[in-house]
Image: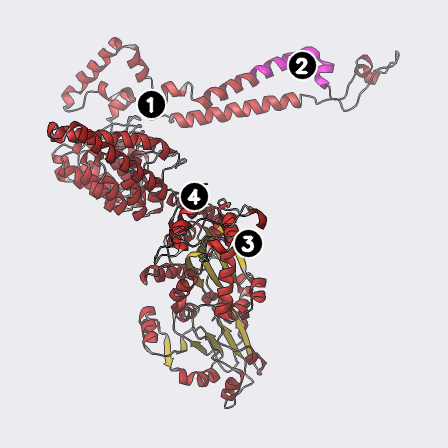
Amino acid sequence: MASCFATSLAVAETGRCSFNCEYSSSVHCFRDQVRYFGRSRGRIKPLVYPYSSIPRCEVSVVEKESNVSGLEVLKTSDRYINMSSNIMVIGLNIHTAPVELREKVSIPESEWPQAILELCSLNHIEEAAVLSTCNRIEIYVVALSKNHGIKEVTEWMCKYSGVSVTELREHQFLLYNKDATQHLFEVAAGLDSLVLGEGQILAQVKQVVKNGQGERVPGFGRKISELFKHAITAGKRVRTETNISSGSVSVSSAAVELALLKHIPDSSSMSPRVLIVGAGKMGKLVIRHLIAKGCKEMVVVNRTEDRVAAIREELNTDDAGVIIEYKPFSEMLSCTAQADVIFTCTASKDPLFVKESVQAALRCVNSSLSRLFIDISVPRNVESRVSELEGACIYNVDNLNEVVEANKEDRLRKKKEAEVIIAEEVKKFEALKDSLETVPTIKKLRACAERIRAAEVEKCLSKIGDDDLSENNKKAIYDLSLVIVNKMLHGPMQHLKCCETPLHISCSSGHLEFSKEIIHLMPEFVRELNQDGFSPLHIASANGDIEIVKELLSVDYNLCLLKGKDRRISLHYAVIKGREHVMKELLVASPDSAEEVTARGETCLHLAVKNHQFERFKLLLENLKEFNMYDILNKKDIQGNTVLHLAVSTKQYEVVDILLDENVVSKGTIEMNSLNKGGLTPLEVLLKESGDRDIEEILRTSGAVSAEPLQSSQQEGLPQSWVVPVQDPSNEQSSREQTRDDWPRSNSKKLQDFFKYNKTKDPPGKVRDTLLVIAILIATSTYQTVLSPPGGVWQDTYLPEGNKSNNNDVNMESSRCIAGQSVMGTNNPISYGLFLVFNSIGFFVSLHTINFLTIGFPLQLELQV
């Protein structure tokens, strides 16, 4: 109903329907609109009405002069119409179409902006992007209608390329919404390439965004832009987490591998003579891979020498002993006659090598020698008829399968890992897309509420009289109206989000402009926690999005102290991820945030040391010095470890050195002999962990000590408060006697503390694990004994008949033997009964022991560190 109402408004304002025809004279147009508005997201619900049942529009409308078309009004009239827009991809790739067809439809990079403008001029296309490489030509669009969008884009491709609609439809593929998103993410990750994990495709996807934003192409809109940006993120994550890009993973590298496989050098030459035609991006990669394979000499044909010189400088060929000789295009055929392997990689639309010209060039040389043409250009640079010449062999991008098949199992394993990451990124993007669509609704609700609020406040003030109210009273009324509106809108806004607010999703995706918009519309979202316990500031801090962090802090600086999962604040996440610029912003906004601890008692310094963030640790230490908050250095985590304990344990020399700086130690700001819950000083932790000599020297130089030998025999395991520090040897005996005399007067709690585990014995974790293994072994053996009792079981049933006597089988005659019955139970029932009793006791005792150890009792009370 909302959509139909919006359409009525659009038609009423323009006097024309959304398909640019007079609504009063076209029943077909209205029928198409009815079908369109019956569409739900991701699926078309056709609402078919007989023509006779559709009344002709009889409303008299005064046409208004306007530069805005009815279609534009329809697109922007209501959010619910925009929700039905579909993201679609229509194209050809190496899996669906041969190179002969792909080269006809391919679009050069220089023509992408014009192609986008032409696509967006179509009636049902809102946004568009073009991705054209040697392996694919794909057009991504945001369409108001699936069917109309497919038809219009297909007709445009046919018009551009000159290919018939029938031929194009036979080879093209179509994907919608989530499937289209997943496809682009797989493309960016190199999963859809001929060579799995190809690295160059990610750069080509980046180029799409660069062209769309750099040249400010109007058709490269918000949805398409976010789709490609997220695809780049997904591609980077796959390459980082799966190492899928290792090995020969590009068309250029595969071409070089193919040349090594196929070329057999002439006996008169020690190495093949190589010619590269084209010094663009692909040509540079071919040269790089040839050098990596040991090629020392090559000729490069290009229109200008500048690019060749730049390649020499970038690859540092002079120092590597590699000779790259430049030749102009006018000498291309003569160079071809002297070469054994020819790589072609230019953007020429017409073939550079045709049969007649190559044949003429080979007349002056030995034409019987084999020449290998490897054409990785689309459109192709080498005419297929060249293969008819004697000794000429041609390979193009569709012939790289032989190289691709190598290490297939390893690449498939990495592909499965990558698919899991792709699924996660698709889910994130779908959430972002849904959140983008809530913005118009939030704006309308806000605008409507604001109009009502402002009008009612004016009425109230006019009734009371401006002269009778002070400025403070007016401000109080104004603030009250705002509070009422915000509380009334909070409920409806809650229904616009599921587990996360739109602000969570925009911060997770790094969308600055969208985040600004949401913060302005709904500032209360900044304090919301999602289902995982993260606020928007937590997410932005972890991601390192400094601009979003600044926008969030502009609402309320106290957000720095907002605790989330495990009682962590934003500074903790910034430290863990190493976001130094975010840390500086958070510390400036709230210096006190450095004192906050997590649920495990960890300060930001603990987290920096645990995650080996030395530079971030230095930044935090400088902040502590500036605000004189040295006491944080001595704070202990849940295990009683200070920062020095952790630095020593992980053998981080730089951290220990900066902590035990002369200025810090002289001021007494760090307790270098503090005991953790295991009763260990930092020096003892180092010695127990097979210490580092350099760190040990720093500790001993700064005054770190371990327990005295005499004290260790009697006082190991005592709480620190019980032990009198050793300052003078003459007072050592009296101090020890005084401590011993105090024990009888201690309460039961101190006695329990005294009998806690000794640090020289096995730690409680090892004790528990050992007992648990023993208990499991006992339970297993006793259970197995019941299944297989001593002596085994009878295999057959024997029932004695009459009074047969047989001296050899007395037991067999005097008792009944049943298959499966215990032999011991049959021959000696009393002994077997005792065996069962004690075996059962062992079984049940071991089960109870396992239960106690699993839940942590009694170690949880007395032995836990």
Q: Which residue is mark 2?
A: 832
**Percent position of residue 550, x then y:** 23, 43
Mark before the other along the chain sequence, 1 or 4 = 4
Q: Quadrant of residue 560?
A: top left
Mark before the other along the chain sequence, 3 or 1 = 3
Bounds of the magenta span? 820-842
Viewer-nearest of discs 2 and 3: 3
- Determine if residue 233 is in view: no
**Are the residues at dot 2 and dot 3 in contact (C-beta closer than 8 Å)?**
no
Q: Which residue is mark 1?
A: 758
> Is 38 above or below relative to 672?
below
Viewer-nearest of discs 3 and 1: 3
Residue type beneath disc 4: Phe
> Is 342 above or below relative to 851?
below
The CA span between labels 4 and 3 is: 57 Å
The CA span between labels 4 and 2 is: 88 Å
**Are the residues at dot 1 and dot 4 in contact (C-beta closer than 8 Å)?**
no
Residue type beneath disc 3: Glu
Mark before the other along the chain sequence, 4 or 3 = 4
Magenta-drawn stretch, dominant element (helix, strand or loop)? helix
The CA span between labels 2 and 1 is: 45 Å
**Label 3 neighbourhood size at 10 Å, few (<14), some (14-19), many (20+)?**
few
